[in-house]
Amino acid sequence: MGRWIADTLHAERGGKAGRALILGLTFKENVPDLRNSRSFDLVERLSELGYDVDVADPLADAAELQAIHGLQLTESDGEAYDLVVGAVGHQAYRDLAPDRLNSWVKDGGTLADIKGIWRGLTLDPSIRRWSL
């Protein structure tokens, strides 16, 4: 499913790669377990499509993530991305203020809300929204 989502998002963006931020890597919301997570399929496929992918997860163990998947957690402080994907519905992501979420997406960028955690948020109209 992660590969299909990546391919669909890439097509939605007109086949243009860019910088991507994946929010959530654990197996399910509000737990730190990385085993069996499908988020890594999404990260891998976006990388194959030419995206520069950053990953974030407030519950994931950074050392485990590096050792098993070769990935480093990023702290999104002021950087804007062409594509931001809400992959795991952690409470920390559900509680994000609209202005914080807006700041992570470039003008004309895409916010992919896989888990439907931001359906009720009013965001900048320049942001393209995508959900399952």
Image (cartoon, rainbow, N blue to C red):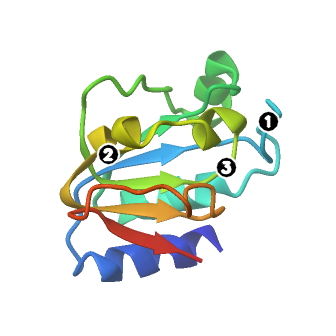
- Residue under pointer 3: 88
Task: Establish if 25 lies above or below 4.
Answer: above
At label 2, counting other C-alpha atoms closer than 10 Å, the crowd grade (few under 14, some 14-19, many 20 or more) is many
Residue 30 shows which numbered tag? 1
Sequence-first disc among 3 and 1: 1
Sequence-first disc among 1 and 2: 1
Picture quadrant of residue 32:
top right
Sequence-first disc among 3 and 2: 3
Residue 13 location, x and y as percent?
26, 75
Check disc 1 and give the amino acid type: Asn
Tag 3 secondary structure: loop
Asked if labels 1 and 3 touch by Cβ distance under 8 angstroms, the answer is no
Position of the N terminus by quadrant: bottom right
At label 3, counting other C-alpha atoms closer than 10 Å, the crowd grade (few under 14, some 14-19, many 20 or more) is many
What is the distance, in whole Å, between disc 3 and disc 2 at their CAs?
A: 18 Å
Tag 1 secondary structure: loop
Specify whether 70 is left or right of 77. Answer: right
Q: Residue at x 79, y 35 (%)?
A: 30
Check disc 3 and give the amino acid type: Val
Q: Residue at x 37, y 28 (%)?
A: 76
Pair 1/2: label in front: 2
- Residue under pointer 2: 102
